[in-house]
Structures are given as C-alpha cells and as structure tokens.
Amino acid sequence: MCDLHAWISQQIGTTERLAVKAAQCTANEWEAVCSLILTVRTESDERVAGEAVIESSFHTFDEALLHTARHDPAAVLRRCVADRKILDLYKVTKQIAEQSDDPNVMDLINAARQNLPALTSVVRSLAEGYGWTENGHG
C-alpha cells in the first residue's frame, strides 16, 4: 500500500500548482476555455480522446461560469492550505502514537494513540476527494 500521507501531499501540490496557474488566467482566457468545452460537447458525435471531459462538460456557458466561480483559484488554494493542516495534524499524531512508552509523556502518547484511528479515517476521506481508493491511489 502506498504511503497515504505522501500520496495526498503530492495530490494537493498538483492541485495547488494548477490553481496558481488558473489564477493567472484573464477573463477572456476563461471564456475561451469554456467556449472550447461547449464546442467539443455540442459538435462531437464520435468518441474521441478526452471522452471523460466531454461527458462531464457543461451544457451551457452559464453552467461553465457557475462551475468556474465555485472553483475559483483563491478558494482552491484555501482548501489546499486547510488540507495540509489536516495532514500535518495526522503526521504529528502518528509520530507521537508510534513512540515508545516514555513515562514522561504517557498522557500525550495515549491521547495520540486514542485519536489516531479517527484522524486516519478523516485523512482517508480527504484523500478520496483527490482520487484515492482502498486499492491504492487513483
């Protein structure tokens, strides 16, 4: 099984880089992209490479604009920051939980051990949003 923390960190990084690039697009560039998606959707009768994009593309320009507004680069970058905070908490909690039974910090170790399963579930759920499956990465 792939290291979940490393995998999702890579996915967040990819999402972050794309959002930074998208933030640099002008309104005219966004309009051109949306128009291209609509053109492919309405004019293509044959199955072509990129079929998934065609199947999940928009039916109207307004739908494309609404999607873009909901996924604006600034919001995507905020979600990346929030996702990294969850991963950092998971990493620290896991490191503490895996410590030997040091009597000076047993309360902290026990708390980490008790919370790690729930936090692992949160991280797996977060990873699913980036394409992770129980069989490995997406």
Image: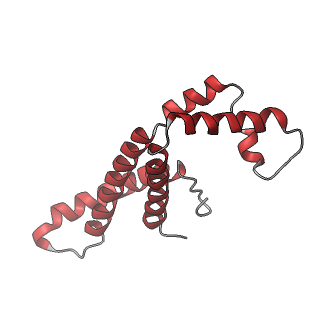
**Residue displayed at 49% across by 38% down:** 26
**Residue displayed at 29% across by 69% down:** 95
Farthest left residue in view: 104
**Residue displayed at 32% across by 65% down:** 94
Farthest right residue in view: 46
Q: Position of residue 18 (x, y in %)?
A: 50, 52
Answer whether residue 67 is visible to the viewer in this image: yes
In the displayed structure image, the side of residue 44 where residue 50 appears, left or right: left
Quarter of the figure with the C terminus = bottom right
**Residue displayed at 83% across by 35% down:** 43
In the displayed structure image, the side of residue 17 where residue 95 appears, left or right: left
How many numbered circles are shown? 0
Q: Position of residue 46 (x, y in %)?
A: 89, 43
* Pick the front one: 106 or 120: 120
Q: Quadrant of residue 40?
A: top right
Q: Quadrant of residue 44?
A: top right
Q: Position of residue 9 (x, y in %)?
A: 43, 61
* Pick the front one: 126 or 31: 31
Q: Position of residue 64 (x, y in %)?
A: 61, 30
Quarter of the figure with the N terminus = bottom right
In the rendered view, tell whether residue 105 sits above or below residue 37: below
